[in-house]
Amino acid sequence: MLRQNIANAGKSLWRNLFESMRIDGPYEPSADAIGRRSLAITALGYLAKVEPIDALLRNIDASASNLTERYAAYRIARSDAGEQVSLELSERFLGRADTDEVLDLWLSTEAMNEKTATIDRVKELTSHPRFAWTNPNRVRAVLGTFANRNVRAFHTPEGYRLLADSVLKLDAMNPQIASRLVMPLCQWGRFVKSFQEAMKSELRRMVAKDLSKDLYEIVSKSV
């Protein structure tokens, strides 16, 4: 809501700001270029909230000379573009993900985008061929991001159940990762009573299981 209000307030400014800050040509790592690129991407994100820019996002994705701009086009498309462009740029970004770092960037973006990252979508990500429960970085990219940054989907009974089930699954493979991943549920005291009860319910369900020493200590102290 805050970002939308900011976008609305500056509606007449975003396109001009984006066009004046955009840099054509090869990537330059200079401070000036980095600053201009960052400001252009910020303006582009707000522009997408006040007018259709699907064609512009496609163009940026196709012509970008660097990961920063391609990622910006994909991320903004997932949040504010039409469904076809949103899916298209997501698939393209994944198709170019030839390193672990870029793959994790895609996974985390898919897990936190509140427009598209529903509970079902997060489950799909954990079943993706390039996801592995035994890889801590993949787990953090999807489930850690989901629990810490996807407020809309995580803070539901279904979201709490998904995290709890995932932690239980991980506990048999990597108790240390499971112990860190469970922490968002253990922070129930920060929320109003209705959320607290749902979070504590999952913790009580977990503590009744045969947990590793590491996970049991954390969960038992939380309830």
Image (cartoon, helix red, strand yellow):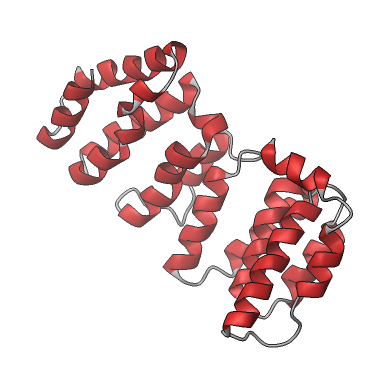
The residue sitting at 15% across, 25% down in the picture is: 210
Of residues 17 and 188, the one nearer the viewer is 17
Q: Position of residue 198 (x, y in %)?
A: 40, 15
Question: In this rendering, would 63 be left or right of 124?
Answer: right
Residue 220 shows in the view: yes
Quadrant of the image for the C terminus? Answer: top left
**Residue 112 pos. (x, y %):** 54, 44
Q: Is residue 126 above or below residue 198?
A: below
Image quadrant in which the N terminus is located: top right
Q: Is residue 219 left or right of residue 16?
A: left
Residue at image coords 42%, 42%: 143
Given residues 11 and 65, the one toward you in this image is: 11
Q: Is residue 189 above or below residue 3?
A: above
* Residue situated furthest left in the rendering: 213
For the point 55% across and 52% down, which residue is it?
109
Looking at the image, residue 191 sits to the left or right of residue 83; the answer is: left
- Left or right? Give the position of 45 relative to 19: left
Q: Is residue 209 visible?
A: no
Residue at figure coordinates x 82%, y 43% from the top left: 8
Front in this rendered view, residue 39 or 83: 39
Count of residue discs: 0
Query: In the rendered view, would you say 217 is above or below 85?
Result: above
Q: Tell which of 170 and 45 is nearer to you.
A: 45
x, y percent for residue 134: 29, 51
